[in-house]
Image: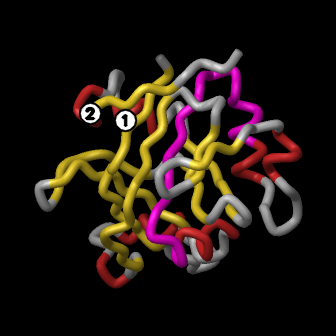
Amino acid sequence: MAKIFKEIDPQQIKGNPFKLIGKDWMLITAGTPESFNTMTANWGGLGFLWNKNVCFCVVRPTRHTYNFIDKSGYFTLSFFEEKYREILNFCGSTSGKNVNKVAETGLTPVTGKDAIYFEEARLVLECRKIYFHDINPKHFLYPEIDGFYPKKDYHRMYIGEIIRCLVKD
C-alpha cells in the first residue's frame, strides 16, 4: 500500500537544499491530467522572495517540458528516494515527444490541487508560477558560463510560489 502524503510548511523541509536539488535531483512536471510531461533537473533553488516561499528552476526551450510549463500556471517539483535513480536518469535523457515516460517508468501520476506529481515521490512542491525570465548571455559575468550552452539554447528561469509542500507520512 502506498504511503500517504501529509502537508507541511515548506520551512519544515528536512535536509540540505543543495543536496536535495543538486545531488538527489527532481522531476519538474507541468500540464493537465490529460496532457503533461516531466523531466529530470538538478539546477534550481529554494528560498524566500516577495514575502513568499519560492523555488526556482530552469528549463531549456529545446526540452519537451518547456511548452507545458510555459502554458501552465502551475508546476511541481517531485523528489525521490535513491532507489528511483534509474527512473530519474531515464526521464532526464529521454524526450516525452518520443515516449510515454509514465508508461515506460511505471510512475503513478497524482492530480494535486493544480498540477501533477507522482505517488512514488518522497517530497512534492506544488508551485504557482509567478515569474519567468530568459537567461541572457550578455549578462554572464564569467565567460566560461557560456560553455554550458554549446547550442545557445539558454534556459528560461521560472520562479514558483510554493503553494503546497507534501511529504510521505
Residue 98 is drawn in which quadrant?
bottom right
Q: CA distance from mark 1 to mark 2?
A: 19 Å
Q: Secondary structure at mark 1?
A: helix
> Residue at (85%, 56%) from the top-left corner?
100
- Viewer-side residue, 73 vs 23: 73
- Viewer-side residue, 90 vs 150: 90
Relative to residue 152, is residue 56 depicted above or below?
A: above
Residue density around tag 2, few if under 14, some if 14–19, many if 20 or more, within 10 Å = few
> Residue at (52%, 76%) from the top-left corner?
70
Q: Position of residue 132 (x, y in %)?
A: 36, 74
Q: Which residue is mark 2?
A: 9
Q: Quadrant of the N terminus?
A: top right
- Label 2 amino acid? Asp
> Residue at (50%, 26%) from the top-left corner?
5
Residue 129 is drawn in which quadrant?
bottom left
Q: In this image, 1 relative to 114: left or right?
A: right
> Residue at (80%, 55%) from the top-left corner?
94
Q: Which residue is mark 1?
A: 18
- Label 1 amino acid? Phe
Query: Can residue 16 be found in the magenta stretch?
Result: no
Q: Magenta segment range?
A: 70-89
Query: Can residue 82 be found in the magenta stretch?
Result: yes
Relative to residue 13, is residue 97 depicted above or below?
A: below
Q: Position of residue 35 (x, y in %)?
A: 72, 66
Residue density around tag 1, few if under 14, some if 14–19, many if 20 or more, within 10 Å = some
